[in-house]
Amino acid sequence: MESRYEYGLLGAGAVSASLIGKLPARARELGPVSAVSYRVASRIANTLRAGFPVRSAAELSEARCILFHSPPEFLAPLLRQLENAALDWTGKTLLVCGCVVDRAVLRRFEDKGATTAIAWRFEVAGRLIVEADESGGAAQRIARRIASELRLKAVDIPPDATDLVGAAVTLGGAAVTPLIDRTAALFKAAGVKDSEAARIAASLFEQCARDYAHSGKQSWAWYVRKPAVEQLRAQITVAEPMLFPLFRRLLLFAFQTFGKHEEIGEQLGGVAPRDPGAG
């Protein structure tokens, strides 16, 4: 059957808050909308002010690209509903928007003749992650077009790389926040007002990130020149007990990562924290 509509939708949950709901008015190309029930499909179409509800996933056959969005609790039944629908997948695209679907599940649709991709908003503003393999060209192109319509930059990654991206996001975000907080605490301990200490700490991390974006590893303060060992010793020893081992370990990690000044790391190995009771 020839596709009458650019997009069809199978969804559940807050579809209007997803990538699908952010599409501009031009996306009134949306046709059939399917869900766990006709009532839910009607509600989704009314909320989006686009498309029309249908009673079964089989009616998504009129769409060239099927957009999919679901919260975790409805993911499995909706995918079963789609997989069991009497659909000819040849030449069709399944684009998963803003949720996690196992690649093994997507491969079953690919075996039926579909191209597939996963697209999700990145924590970095202005980016859209697009996960697709080499055979997913059509799906990748549609995802990129959606990124363009949303004025986002598509960042392409291969299949099964989601956890790598997640690890990078955690390492560059949630894992770093406590370091910013402890940096601000050191400024406060030095007599800087609380609000100013927080701003200065944040600025230090922002400047470090900007320098890295510009020069990469060469932006590291000690890429060329050696750090002063005695200064590092003094700085480590004044750190609070909870921060002390991490401070030293981060310095050793830096020397090992860049393959420089590792002999200084050995010299720092014997540094002990200052006794809080000492005068």
Image (tube, helix red, strand yellow):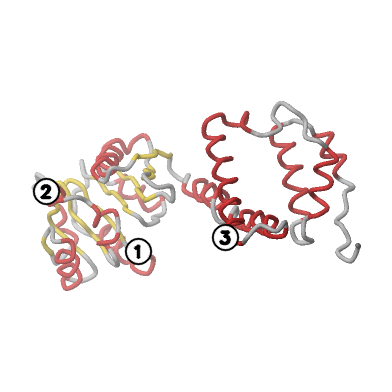
Cα distance in 3D space between marks 3 and 1: 44 Å
12 vs 116, nearest the viewer: 12
User: Where does residue 206 sit, x and y in percent of width and height?
Assistant: 54, 44
204 vs 104, nearest the viewer: 204
Dot 3, how many residues are within 10 Å of its Cα: few (below 14), some (14-19), or many (20+)? few
Amino acid of disc 1: Leu
Q: Is residue 273 left or right of residue 250?
A: right
Q: Are marks 3 and 2 in contact (CB under 8 Å)?
A: no
Helix, strand or loop at disc 1?
Answer: helix
Which of the marked residues, 3 or 1, is nearer the chain's N terminus?
1
Residue found at the far bottom of this picture: 39
Image position of 52 with respect to 254: above or below: below
Q: Residue at x 87, y 57 (%)?
A: 274
178 vs 228, nearest the viewer: 228
Q: Which residue is mark 3?
A: 195
- Residue 5: give its label: 2
Which of the marked residues, 3 or 2, is nearer the chain's N terminus?
2
Which of the marked residues, 1 or 2, is nearer the chain's N terminus?
2
Cα distance in 3D space between marks 1 and 2: 24 Å
Q: Which residue is mark 1?
A: 75
